Image (cartoon, rainbow, N blue to C red):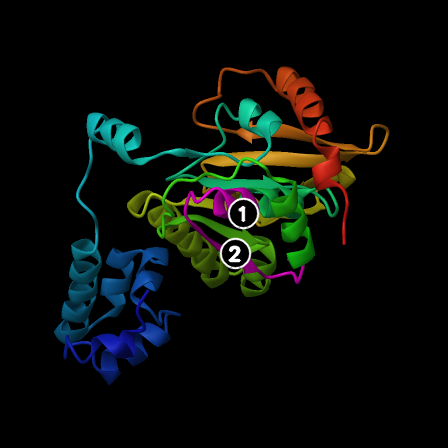
Amino acid sequence: MAPLEDLERIYPIIDSDFRMFCASHGIFTDEDFLLHDLSALEAFAAPEKLKQGIKQIISIMESRQRPWLNGLELLEDAQLNKCTLSTGCERIDVLLQGGLREGHVTELVGPSCSGKTQVCLKAASHVARNSLGKVVYFDTGNSFSPKRIAQFLSLSSDASTAEIDFQVRMLIIDSLSSLIAPVLGGGGAHGHALMVTAGFLLKEIAHEFNVCVVVTNHMVAGEAGISKPALGESWKSIPHVRLLLSKKYSTNGTCITILKHPYLVGISSSRLLTLGMLFIHCITVSLTTRY
């Protein structure tokens, strides 16, 4: 996303007159054009120079598009370059048929104290402990616990003796909704465009750099008082994998339900709930203690 004034140095046609015209239509960056009917916009651009400016912006955006890949190329890339990273918890890994996949954006959604941060800390400590690669951890809610990380590391006895991989293998944002919700404002188009852009940027990072991206999201009140994931319908299609975590106070455990997964679409939701309760219950000691 580039502010229009930054483009004038390279493209003189995007001058102050053109930017004033764009600003009158709520356009301040090149990607803001995606929210408008360009044919209708050209109708308002009476001087030919303004129409040329619009065509220049379209040309810039088209040049940034990556070449198309067919299904076989995507499959080959997934087999050769996209590995599965263990979460450090055998039961979760079994549920996800190996763990968290590189190239995917995995969303952990659930109410407060459902175990989202604990899963993130567990996965981060496991990847770092076993020399699988670097972990970049963004804590937006002041919930990162070095003491908890230290405890996970001390409990781990399967550290690898392999050479350390200095490549970033995992990116964690806990929580993404705390970061994005303020820009959504009252539900305006500009805020939603920023959210979707951020989502596609995370997917691009995951795919291009073979990184496992993990984000957390909280719950908000929905219709009839039923809770639903925050960030709305626009965000819903962004993550490749969506896992719902819910607290089970009767068993002092957490239930994990797979809401969305590209490889596990054939499993029924009732079966998922049973599996989630079984698997996560076995790791409640690791996930429910808070400091």
**Quadrant (top left/top right/bottom left/bottom right) for the C terminus:** bottom right
Q: Which residue is mark 2?
A: 137
Query: Three-letter amino acid code at disc 2?
Result: Tyr
Neighbor class of circle 1 (other Cα within 10 Å; few <14, some 14-19, many 20+) is many
Q: Which mark is residue 124?
A: 1
Horizontally, residue 179 falls left or right of residue 31, namely right
Q: Quadrant of residue 87?
A: top right
Q: Quadrant of residue 82?
A: top left
Along the line of sight, which residue is nearer the eye, 14 or 139? 139
**Which residue extends farthest right?**
250
Query: Three-letter amino acid code at disc 1?
Result: Ala
Neighbor class of circle 2 (other Cα within 10 Å; few <14, some 14-19, many 20+) is some
Segment tinted magenta in the rendering: 124-145
Q: Residue at x 20, y 56 (%)?
A: 64
Q: In the image, is residue 21 above or below residue 1?
A: below
Along the line of sight, which residue is nearer the eye, 56 or 266? 266
Q: Are marks 1 and 2 in contact (CB under 8 Å)?
A: yes
Q: Describe the element under mark 2 as helix, strand or loop.
A: strand
Q: Is residue 134 magenta?
A: yes
Q: Quadrant of residue 243?
A: top right
